[in-house]
Amino acid sequence: MAETAGVHTSTDMPLPASMKAWVLGDPGQLHLIEKPLPVPGRAEVLVRIDAVAICATDLEIIEHGTPALIQGGPPFNKNFTPGHEYMGTIAALGPGVDEYGIGERVTVEIHAGCGQCKRCRQGMYTSCHNYGLNYGAVDKGHRANGFTTDGGFAEYAVNHINTLSRVPDGMSDEEATLVVTAGTSMYGLTELGGLVAGESVVVTGPGPIGLLAVAVAKALGASPVILSGTRDARLAIGTKLGADRVVNINNEDLVAVVREMTGRGADYVVECAGTGATINEAAKMVNRGGRICLAAFPHEPVLVDIGALVKNNVYVYGIRGEGRSATHRAMALMAARRFDATLIHTHTFPLAELPTALHYARNRIDDAIKVVVKTRGAVTRARNAVA
Ligand SMILES: [Zn+2]
Ligand SMILES: [Zn+2]
């Protein structure tokens, strides 16, 4: 790589000629292979990956392909490396990059977009109109690592500098992998208008995005914040992350609780469960003129009382990913220790054990929430002690 024109390397970070990378074969099949080191282009850096968290979307891509799009089609048998929630250390600088230095710790967001379409220009690069167009005669330079370009289940990846956030010294590698999840929650609240201080927020579904939506909403001053779900262990984590009230919908009527606590219903609902029932309930518990963010989705069409939404001037926002630099705002809150995202990190595995790590995440073995894979050092399989 040292010979590649314009790429800066350092003897402090010697680079191997090749790296270990997991690649997707047929659906559900991953293989650990040696790949050449990727070379950063203009406005890009090479990141040595130190840790990567597993996301439900990774499981979706590995089993079903979508929403990954490689060379215009499904990602199978194309030498594609999935994984998108990673952090690491800058190991080489592409031509023209002076914004970062070799050796800096960074965490990444997924989407760089194409940088030239209407939505990218608006900061909505997760809705890039040139999604997946990064090959051949129609190369628009789109990047969404782990979706349309190689991702983080490997020892190195190339990232556009706009996708990077610096990691403060006191933050662990594992915690830094969670910034993009918190960034997704932040993006939801951003699209809802952002000014949630003193406003009531209901979060439905205590998955990683829902739990961190509670944490971010609380850090931004929302009150009360109500979290619903079906598993008490996860709801207890929501309480630790700042929820004023948790509702196990197997035992209580969520709409009734929200109405009782807020009077006229919630100002904002962040719907992270993605079932027909929870989406329809969101419409029932939001107040007149209130706003609903749909951060998860069912795979089948669902019946929702649209009449109630229209008659009550309710705004509905679908969000994808972590646009408008939301990860930077999430990192600011995490760096300031406004909430402890590590409460959702439950398990750690070495990179060589990725299939086992995916198995834990998919089947929620041992109450797994966020499973992190570490690429360096003597990593042993571990369950975090969630106090
Ligand atoms: Zn993700
Ligand atoms: Zn674009």
Image: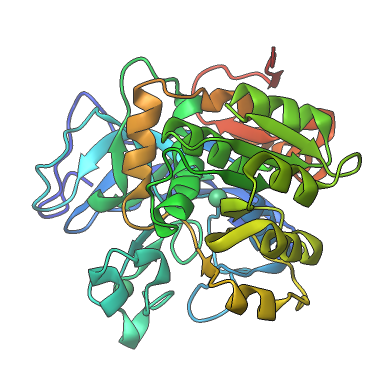
Horizontal side of residue 34 vs 261, given as left or right: left
Residue 129 sits in quarter:
bottom left
Tell me where residue 10 appears, x and y as whole percent.
17, 31
Q: Is residue 371 above or below residue 257?
A: above
Q: As rendered, which of 82 and 183 lies closer to the eye?
A: 183
Horizontal side of residue 385 vs 135, given as left or right: right
Identify the residue at horizontal 73%, vertical 25% (top origin). 236
Identify the residue at horizontal 34%, vertical 70% (top origin). 142
Q: Is residue 37 above or below residue 140?
A: above
Residue 237 sits in quarter:
top right
Quarter containing ligand 2? bottom left
Identify the residue at horizontal 35%, vertical 82% (top origin). 136
Residue extending farthest front: 263
Tell me where residue 344 appears, x and y as whole percent.
63, 29
In this orientation, does residue 294 appear? no
Q: As rendered, which of 19 and 114 lies closer to the eye?
A: 114
Residue extending farthest right: 251
* Total numbered labels: 0
Residue 226 sits in quarter:
top right
Q: As rendered, which of 162 and 159 lies closer to the eye?
A: 162
Q: Is residue 87 above or below residue 22?
A: above
Tell me where residue 50 appears, x and y as whole percent.
44, 30
Tell me where residue 77 appears, x and y as whole percent.
62, 68
